[in-house]
Image: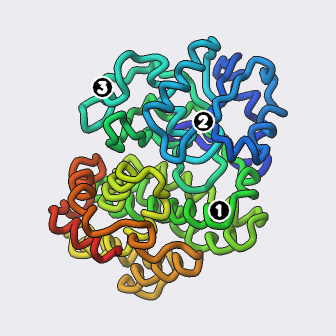
Amino acid sequence: MAFINYVTQVQFGLGAVSCISGECDRLGIRKPLIITDKGVRAAGLVDKVLSVLDCADDTRIFDETPSNPTEGAVRAAVGMYRSGGHDGIIAIGGGSAIDLSKGTALCATHDGPLSKFAVIEGGMPSITEAVAPVIAVPTTAGTGSEVGRGAILIMEDGRKLGVLSPYLVPKVAVCDPELTYGLPRQLTAATGMDAIAHCIETFLSPLFNPPADGIALDGLRRGWQNIRKATDFPNDGDARLNMMSASMQGAMAFQKGLGCVHSLSHALGGLDPSLHHGTLNAILLPAVIEFNASSDSVRNERKLDRLAEAMGLKEAQSISAGIRDLSAALGLPAGLRELGVEVEMFPEIIEGALADHSHKTNPRIATPEDYGKILTDSL
């Protein structure tokens, strides 16, 4: 089992879930609140954690996490946290449960509405080290939220905003690939493409961070080589381990920022919370790569050539086609129209994308017209 200390402490490997009780002891968590969703709970994954938790008798479970976490769900979880006198959170699930846990850890210890802490509202300096400790236990291999400093949450006014701070990084991530064995095929594919999108987009960000670039490229190589195997053979331990690593690595590199894929997918998710984030990223990625190809930073640093090499493709020009072919092989939707997105929705989507925090870290700053073309090409 590897022990990694990069942006946070990581316990990684098959069977890593067995260390959770020791991590609670190390962090002084005696009465944790588990935050999860009904599907993860029904799959028996919460019981698996409880079975190795010494303080299980003092633990309560909040399982009302929606598919896209909302401010209302944060308030409900905060109410349970405070009424139960809890002193920490164990997040068990995908990005939604982990992001909801971050929002809960923040709002349980800080006054004010959630939107006050959003990046675009200038809220990062308001977040302090008083944030309640979170242990993140991912059950999907996609968002990498277990090592990320941010949470994407839908506010009361419908905006899907990022809340970012070093204090929101979970105190420890317990990454056990065995917890992903029961993930449905479609969710394995969609979350896996989410991880691949993260590795690609953060690598293309123009900010200077060579270590993050190296982590992103290695994560992309692992994800690209293993996503089909993990999808087709769900109990393949090696494939699941590499997909969980790709997910973690993509998020470790997030400190470089993301780009137009995420500014658009965040806007779409705010417009229709039922849309799966990873599926949206897979659909949008080819058109955004084509848009970014003429960027000075992308051309000068041969970034597309380096991506192609990590993906095992012969030339940079085949990256977008390769992504579309992979999505098709995985059974994912080919375009936004299959998800119910129509041209009439574009103005509202574009308005949200322009206001998103990922908009400014794209290699090329997109205009409303640029976003319109990306959306059209992704239909």
Q: Earlier in the sequence, mark 1 or mark 3?
A: 3
- What whole-number distance in Å separates the C-alpha atoms at marks 2 and 1? 30 Å
Q: Residue at x 54, y 73 (%)?
A: 332
Tag nearer the camera, 2 or 1: 2
| Amino acid carrying mark 1 in the image | Asn
In the rendered image, which quarter is residue 48 located in? top right
**Image coords of residue 199 (percent x, y):** 46, 61
Let me know if residue 88 appears in the view: yes
Q: Nearer the viewer, residue 16 or 106?
A: 106
The residue pinned by badge 1 equals 242
Tell me the quarter of the picture where residue 203 sits.
bottom left
| Residue reaching furthest to the right | 51
Badge 2, how many Cα within 10 Å: few under 14, some, many 20+? some
Instruction: State how many labels appear.
Output: 3
Front: mark 2 or 3: 2
Res. 215 visible in picture: no
Q: Give the CA distance from mark 2 to mark 3.
A: 29 Å
Q: Which picture quadrant has residue 118?
A: top left
Q: Which of the labelled discs sits on residue 125, or is there none?
A: 3
Q: Mark 2 or 3 closer to N-term?
A: 2
Q: Is residue 128 above or below residue 152?
A: above
- Position of residue 118 relative to residue 325, above or below, is above
Residue at which label 2 appears: 64
Cα separation, mark 1 vs mark 3, equals 35 Å
